[in-house]
Amino acid sequence: METLVKGRRGAVAAALAAALSVGMAPTAAWAAPGPAGGADRTSRSTARDDGWHGDGLELNAADNHAVDAFLKQAEKAEKEISPRVRAAAVLSEAELIGFDQRLKSPDSLKRKVATSMKETPGQTVNQALATMKDSVRYTLQWPDGKYSSGVTLAANLLSAWGDDAVKWSNTWDRPKGYKGINSAWREPRWGHSYEVQFHTPASKKAQLDTHKIYEEQRLPGTPPERAKELQAQQDAIFAAVPVPARAAGLTAPGSRVPAELSQPVPVAPPATPIATPAATPAATPAATPAATRLPVG
């Protein structure tokens, strides 16, 4: 890793100075305008009595308000997270894909929460929200030849700057289904989880090409036989994705990056959290079914 970092110092010296100025993690110098709509983002689906209704799913008024509060916290947390992710992308020579869509839309999150509650009888809205890791999400992409070293450096940087890896799903070694690494991290100020997907151009294209298929497959009303057909279509597309060298063995960070990059993140005293459920302990999850993945939308 030291050789990797040294080889990049000349090209990223200015970026590193901005990102780690005065001994701090990436700060305002790396800030970016928020996604279109910002704090005024609202659900476009039908609202009746302050509840939410869409695609045959619904949330009552109290549950809808809980999701709205969660979304507001996501917007606050994003301002802390994005500078670090952008700096990690530059330093690891990654392309940051879809940065303008880094905040999940209200309708998309509410649909996901409502689906979870429908599929898990008795589940509360807070329990459902505890499983939502992609209200803030990013995609980093490298060419095949730089993928494994890039993922290693980017993940270690995020860890060194104070974010905890709470999920690491590496599916590169699967014979069928989704290819890539989906990781989730918890930032220290708000305790809010966010997603980082690590892709190659081919795996990202496959994800985009299968997105509508996957969306249909995961709808509660999709018949089992149709779901099998949709899974077979996805398997065929992902089977054509080349696996980068050493990608199948990539794991969540277990050590810090070199001392010159591992400056601490200044953490302000946390405000009272907004009805956020207890954080999930960090762990590398067991293998999940091929159809399971974090969606694009």
Image (cartoon, rainbow, N blue to C red):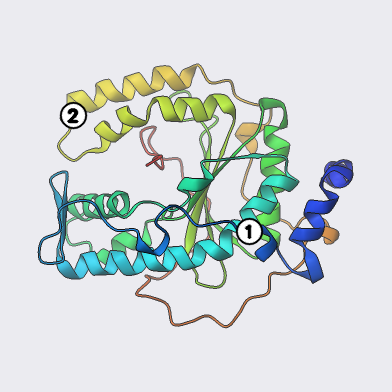
Q: Residue at x 83, y 56 (%)?
A: 258
Q: Position of residue 195 (x, y in %)?
A: 50, 51
Q: Relative to 153, does residue 254 appear above or below in the rendering?
A: below
Q: Earlier in the sequence, mark 1 or mark 2?
A: 1
The residue tagged 1 is: 83
Q: Position of residue 217 (x, y in %)?
A: 26, 32
Q: Position of residue 112 (x, y in %)?
A: 28, 50
Q: Can you tell which quarter of the image residue 95 is in?
A: top right
Asked if one can make out residue 276 in the rendered structure from this viewpoint, the answer is yes
The residue tagged 2 is: 224
Q: Relative to 232, does residue 36 appear above or below in the rendering?
A: below
**Quadrant of the image for the C terminus?**
top left
Q: Can you tell which quarter of the image residue 7 is in?
A: top right
- Residue type highlighted by circle 2: Pro
Q: Residue at x 33, y 20 (%)?
A: 232
Asked if one can make out residue 253 in the rendered structure from this viewpoint, the answer is no
Q: Position of residue 279 (x, y in %)?
A: 44, 67
Please state which of residues 96 and 194 is positioned toward the viewer in this rendering. Answer: 96
Direction from residue 255 to residue 111 in the image, left or right: left
